[in-house]
Amino acid sequence: MLAALRRSGPGCRLTPTELYRSVLVTSATMTERLDRLQRRDLIARRPAARDRRSVLVELTPAGRTVIDRAAAGLLAAEAALLEGLSPADRSALARLLGKLAAQLEQEPGGTASA
Protein backbone atom coordinates (compact mmCIF):
# COMPACT_ATOMS: atom_id res chain seq x y z
CA MET A 1 0.00 0.00 0.00
CA LEU A 2 2.82 2.36 0.77
CA ALA A 3 4.36 1.63 -2.63
CA ALA A 4 1.04 2.26 -4.39
CA LEU A 5 0.75 5.61 -2.64
CA ARG A 6 4.35 6.47 -3.50
CA ARG A 7 3.75 5.66 -7.18
CA SER A 8 0.59 7.78 -7.31
CA GLY A 9 2.48 10.95 -8.15
CA PRO A 10 2.87 14.32 -6.45
CA GLY A 11 1.25 14.38 -3.04
CA CYS A 12 1.37 10.58 -2.76
CA ARG A 13 -2.38 10.35 -2.16
CA LEU A 14 -5.28 8.23 -3.39
CA THR A 15 -8.86 7.59 -2.38
CA PRO A 16 -9.37 4.31 -0.50
CA THR A 17 -11.19 2.94 -3.57
CA GLU A 18 -8.30 3.80 -5.91
CA LEU A 19 -5.90 2.29 -3.41
CA TYR A 20 -7.71 -1.01 -2.91
CA ARG A 21 -8.13 -1.43 -6.66
CA SER A 22 -4.43 -0.86 -7.21
CA VAL A 23 -3.36 -3.42 -4.61
CA LEU A 24 -6.16 -5.91 -5.32
CA VAL A 25 -7.58 -6.43 -1.85
CA THR A 26 -11.12 -6.25 -0.53
CA SER A 27 -12.42 -3.04 1.00
CA ALA A 28 -12.55 -4.71 4.44
CA THR A 29 -8.91 -5.75 4.16
CA MET A 30 -8.06 -2.25 2.98
CA THR A 31 -9.72 -0.65 6.01
CA GLU A 32 -7.85 -2.94 8.41
CA ARG A 33 -4.50 -2.24 6.76
CA LEU A 34 -5.10 1.50 6.61
CA ASP A 35 -5.97 1.50 10.31
CA ARG A 36 -2.67 -0.25 11.12
CA LEU A 37 -0.64 2.07 8.89
CA GLN A 38 -2.31 5.11 10.43
CA ARG A 39 -1.57 3.89 13.98
CA ARG A 40 2.10 3.62 12.93
CA ASP A 41 1.95 7.19 11.48
CA LEU A 42 2.83 5.94 7.99
CA ILE A 43 -0.35 7.29 6.36
CA ALA A 44 -2.89 10.00 7.11
CA ARG A 45 -6.53 10.19 6.12
CA ARG A 46 -7.62 13.66 5.03
CA PRO A 47 -10.99 15.00 3.87
CA ALA A 48 -11.08 15.49 0.10
CA ALA A 49 -11.18 19.15 -0.91
CA ARG A 50 -13.99 18.72 -3.47
CA ASP A 51 -16.22 16.39 -1.45
CA ARG A 52 -15.88 16.44 2.32
CA ARG A 53 -17.70 13.10 2.53
CA SER A 54 -14.76 11.54 0.71
CA VAL A 55 -11.34 10.79 2.17
CA LEU A 56 -7.86 10.82 0.70
CA VAL A 57 -5.13 8.55 2.00
CA GLU A 58 -1.66 10.04 1.83
CA LEU A 59 1.84 9.10 2.89
CA THR A 60 3.23 10.86 5.92
CA PRO A 61 6.91 11.83 5.96
CA ALA A 62 7.56 8.69 8.03
CA GLY A 63 5.68 6.57 5.48
CA ARG A 64 7.68 8.07 2.64
CA THR A 65 10.92 7.28 4.47
CA VAL A 66 9.86 3.66 5.06
CA ILE A 67 8.86 3.02 1.44
CA ASP A 68 11.90 4.84 0.01
CA ARG A 69 14.24 2.71 2.14
CA ALA A 70 12.40 -0.47 1.16
CA ALA A 71 12.57 0.46 -2.53
CA ALA A 72 16.30 1.18 -2.28
CA GLY A 73 16.83 -2.23 -0.68
CA LEU A 74 14.76 -3.92 -3.38
CA LEU A 75 16.68 -2.18 -6.16
CA ALA A 76 20.00 -3.22 -4.61
CA ALA A 77 18.81 -6.84 -4.36
CA GLU A 78 17.63 -6.80 -7.99
CA ALA A 79 20.96 -5.34 -9.13
CA ALA A 80 22.79 -8.12 -7.30
CA LEU A 81 20.62 -10.73 -9.02
CA LEU A 82 21.32 -9.25 -12.45
CA GLU A 83 25.09 -9.08 -11.94
CA GLY A 84 25.43 -12.71 -13.03
CA LEU A 85 23.75 -12.07 -16.39
CA SER A 86 25.58 -11.03 -19.52
CA PRO A 87 24.43 -7.87 -21.31
CA ALA A 88 22.74 -10.09 -23.93
CA ASP A 89 20.92 -12.06 -21.22
CA ARG A 90 19.80 -8.83 -19.53
CA SER A 91 18.48 -7.54 -22.84
CA ALA A 92 16.60 -10.80 -23.47
CA LEU A 93 15.15 -10.72 -19.95
CA ALA A 94 14.00 -7.10 -20.38
CA ARG A 95 12.35 -7.99 -23.70
CA LEU A 96 10.54 -11.00 -22.23
CA LEU A 97 9.39 -9.08 -19.16
CA GLY A 98 8.09 -6.34 -21.45
CA LYS A 99 6.07 -8.91 -23.40
CA LEU A 100 4.69 -10.35 -20.17
CA ALA A 101 3.73 -6.90 -18.86
CA ALA A 102 1.99 -6.06 -22.15
CA GLN A 103 0.03 -9.33 -22.01
CA LEU A 104 -1.03 -8.70 -18.41
CA GLU A 105 -2.24 -5.21 -19.30
CA GLN A 106 -4.42 -6.60 -22.10
CA GLU A 107 -6.10 -9.33 -20.04
CA PRO A 108 -9.31 -8.44 -18.17
CA GLY A 109 -8.59 -8.31 -14.45
CA GLY A 110 -4.83 -8.18 -15.11
CA THR A 111 -4.39 -11.95 -15.25
CA ALA A 112 -2.96 -13.88 -18.13
CA SER A 113 -4.94 -16.75 -19.57
CA ALA A 114 -3.42 -20.25 -19.62
Image (cartoon, helix red, strand yellow):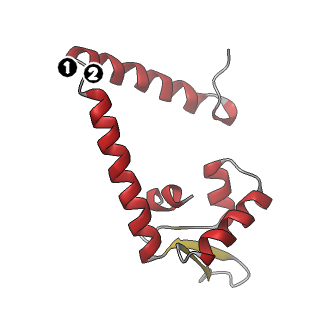
Q: Secondary structure at mark 1?
A: helix
Eyeballing the image, is 38 above or below 91? below
Q: Residue at x 74, y 81 (%)?
A: 53
- Residue 79: name its quadrant: top left
What residue did someone put label 2 on? 90
Eyeballing the image, is 25 above or below 2? above
Whether residue 26 sits left or right of residue 95 in the image: it is: right
Eyeballing the image, is 109 above or below 20? above
Residue type, label 1? Pro
Q: Secondary structure at mark 2?
A: helix
- Residue 18: name its quadrant: bottom right
The quadrant of the image that shows the N terminus is bottom right
- Residue 85: name its quadrant: top left
Please state which of residues 66 and 21 is positioned toward the viewer in this rendering: 66
Q: Residue at x 51, y 62 (%)?
A: 5
Q: Are marks 2 and 1 in contact (CB under 8 Å)?
A: yes
What residue did someone put label 1 on? 87
Q: Residue at x 47, y 70 (%)?
A: 63
Eyeballing the image, is 37 above or below 92? below
Q: Residue furthest left?
A: 87
Estimate the spatial distance between the alpha carbons at disc 2 and disc 1, rounded to whole Å.
Answer: 5 Å
Residue type, label 2? Arg
Whether residue 31 sits left or right of residue 18 in the image: it is: right
The quadrant of the image that shows the C terminus is top right
